[in-house]
Amino acid sequence: MSRYLELAAEWREIIVQKSKFLSELEMEDWRAAVLNWKFGVGLGAAWFLFRRVRNRQHYHHLCEYEYGQYKNVPDWLPSINGRTLDFLAWICNTQVGDLLINKIIMTVVGVPKFRTLKITEGPTFFPFAPHNLPVASLREPVDISGLEKAHKELSYVPNEFRYRRAFEYVQAYRNSQLTPLDVAERIIETIKITNPSLKMLCDWHPEMILEQARESTERYISGKILSPLDGTFCVVKDQISVAGHCNRSGLSFINKIEDEDAPLVTKVRDAGIIIVGISNMTELGMSVFGANPSSYHGTCRNPINTDYYPGGSSSGTAAAICSGLVPFGIGTDGGGSIRMPSCQTGIVGLKTTFSRVSANSYAKAKTCCSTVANIGPMASNIIDLALFYQVLAGPIRGDAFSMAQPKVKVPKELTPYLDGIKIGVDWKWAELSRPEVFINFKKKIEYLAERGARIIGVDIPELDFISTGHLISIVSEGSEAIGEALNKQRKIAPDNVVILNAGLSCCMASDFTLAAKYRTRLMTYLKGLFKTIDVLANPTCAQTAERILDGDENGSWKFGATLRYMMYVKLSNYSGIPSMSVPSGFAPNGLPTGIMLQINYPPVRLICSKSLTIVNLSKSLFCAISTKFKLTQSINS
């Protein structure tokens, strides 16, 4: 027994000694592990702090124009709203977002690749094209006799539904069938019924409308009208100052009432045109759909189908015209903001030549993207578009670019025949649009060929660089313009916070300069292209309108759909050429599609006269609209 006790004591001693040894060994290993971990962290921090910022890169020499097909928009790009979007907006404003998410966004749109371009051309910061045409003078009258003649001769769809043209208002006034005051009263009643659901207008005052209408009525009674458009009605986008109204640029934290009209609004009033109110727009003009969570604005809806967006950012102007409330209105366009909503609502919209309509009226806007943005007309038909264009266009004192523009002219005749007109189409690019869009586009091109046009296939080179250069320009300028509000943590929609943070964090001064150098290259190419063709035709948008989803009320970020909306419109903003969207038909879901015409720099009258060929016989468009949305128009009430 004692022997067993002795053995047990020996084993206990051995176990104790082994335990002490293992404990000491584990302590040493633990200490070693800590030392290794600290060393690893220190080494990693040293590598991060002292690593090369600029590494050796391969630069692309752009000596010759090479055709590179525009990359189709990946289907995996996310559509986000609600709390997920709020989280994304929050994390984008953190170090993690700065290092990761913002750079991913810039990579998807091609900024890193754009930085590797070696461009020999000098920078062009403003896409103003010199010309040798006679320069316009202040308040020079424009000959509109051709438009008056076309108004009398044009055939239109049956009277069950069609848009009332401006000349019909004027004719009714002259024949004492109506007065501007009569129409104003009916417009006010229509706004009260439709605006709560459509949200076309974000600021309007019945007493101001009636006051303008009374003055116009008195002018007709006395025979002292101000212009052939006296007593017609328009809306003005929420980026242009109108006395007595707020100029919010779609934002919720701006409440200052403007004391005076912008110069462009003064021209409109001088023509006797009655301003109904301020039309809704997307916040900062940065959503291409029409979503705006601002309490003063809300999301504007498409009158053709109110379950869908009307397109942006000139959403309210498009909706007011599409619904028949007014014959025309003012929009702005920095990246398709006139043409995209015109396409999505089945009306016509013109992005003018750079500074053809003075940008001085843009000066107070909170997102003044001066190198790509333009002010232009939107209307229900080509004649009214041309009429309103001649009111808006022309020099304004203090704007050097507008003072150097050619004389304003509108078509002397509108003809449905296109004998000898050469229309260029990049078929590979056009085929990237959705099938329903491309089918309507192809039908219109075939129709133009039947009317005498010569269709010429073209290959526009470097489309991916054109897209990235425009994006750098507009995001850099927009981020700078609204950066103060972002840094002060003002209430801004989360989808815009994502874009603005990416712009502020990732777009450098060298990027902006490189984009300006590429603009020179693009303008040089287009001058050569338009020596071989008269008109460049594309689909306006690569898809139809987006559906309004649950959760979109606080913002919606649809990255893939945004790129499809803007696929074709950026070329003219970046280069400064004029561009017009006209209806091309309807998709199977009943939503409109558009065709976009672009021409060389000065002669906008060509694009107006030839656009009639597409619009004049698009009777199915207007008939289809009548079945979708039967808003009783003011003049018929």
Image (spheres, grey):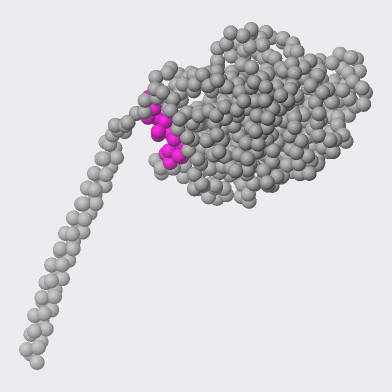
Return the x and y of residue 581 as percentages of the image width and height. 65, 30
Q: Is residue 531 depicted above or below 247 in this figure?
A: above
Q: In which quadrant of the rendered image does the N terminus lie?
A: bottom left
Residue 122 position by quadrant: top left
Return the x and y of residue 549 as percentages of the image width and height. 63, 49
Specify whether residue 364 is in view: no
Magenta stretch prevailing secondary structure: helix
Write down the region rendered in magenta.
Answer: 102-118
Could you tell me which residue is drawn at 51 percent across and 37 percent down? 499
How many numbered marks are there?
Answer: 0
Could you tell me which residue is drawn at 15 percent across and 67 percent down? 22
Check if residue 137 falls in the magenta segment.
no
Return the x and y of residue 345 as percentages of the image width and height. 70, 37
Return the x and y of residue 128 as percentages of the image width and height. 55, 16
Could you tell me which residue is drawn at 8 percent across and 84 percent down? 7
Specify whether residue 1 is in view: yes
Q: Is residue 258 depicted above or below 505 in this figure?
A: above
Residue 286 position by quadrant: top right
Answer with left or right where residue 587 lies relative to residue 75: right
Answer with left or right where residue 84 lies relative to residue 258: left
